[in-house]
Amino acid sequence: MAKYLSIDTEATGLEDHCLLIQVAVVPVDGEKNLVAEDLGKEILIQCPSFETLKPTLSEWVIQHNEGLIRKAHAEGITPQDFVQWMFTYLNSEKVKAFLGGERPLLLGKSLSALDIPLLTKNLGKVFMDKHFHHHTLDITCVGRFLVDAGVLPPGHGSTSQLLKFFNIRTESNHTALSDALDMAQIYLKLIKLMAEKGIGAKS
């Protein structure tokens, strides 16, 4: 079974012009039923001040992410340094050992809508192709499939409903590390659920 890197990003919005401000990564091993929380990392990426960005921000971002934007502006590393940060993380001895020298599959939620475009924009396609497998595991897509298949109750394809269904939390914290850990835990609980229903090799 492939090793995964649960990943989540926070940005100044969902539009093409929006900026990456936070990234978190957590290695996951589905075969060993393991989330390597000790190898989880979170980083802030520098952005312009909240006051500069405010005219371009949605009301939701203004209400919920002002603090994070201010923190990224004050404490974040530069976008250029983020490339080196990710390279160093992926090539660290413990992470390489966990991943077994293989390119990890990215695991997360709504990956194609936000995370992968943002990562590609900031890391570059060459970096993405070299360091990450071209397959991805989008937990929200898996959730929708399992609803259609009758394994999960109707309406349980969203992140918030999956979190509640598995008693992880009542709502997302909307920080990158928390969301990356949540997706990793949901993935393992989905495997367990399938086994309990007698579906799959682990049943």
Image (cartoon, helix red, strand yellow):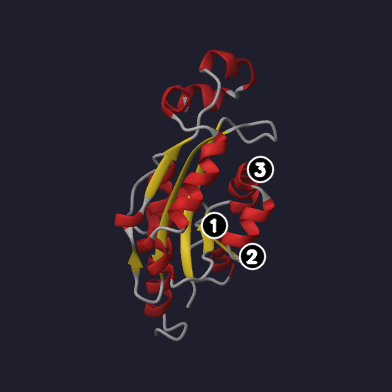
Q: Quadrant of residue 185?
A: bottom left
Q: Quadrant of residue 92?
A: bottom left
Q: Residues within 10 Å of mark 1 (few under 14, many from 20)?
A: many
The residue that label 3 is drawn on is: 121
Amino acid tagged 2: His
- Which mark is first along the chain, 3 or 1? 3
What number is the disc on residue 4? none
Point out the frontmost of discs 1 and 3.
3
Residue 159 place in picture, x, y as percent = 48, 51
Quadrant occupied by the C terminus? bottom left
Q: Residues within 10 Å of mark 2 (few under 14, many from 20)?
A: few
Q: Circle 3 — which element?
A: helix
What number is the disc on residue 134? 2
Image point (54%, 13%), residue name: 51
- Which mark is first along the chain, 1 or 2? 2
Residue 96 place in picture, x, y as percent = 42, 65
The residue that label 1 is drawn on is: 140
Residue lying furthest top in this view?
51
Amino acid tagged 1: Thr
Q: Are marks 1 and 3 in contact (CB under 8 Å)?
A: no
Note whether residue 174 is visible. Answer: no
Q: Quadrant of residue 55?
A: top right
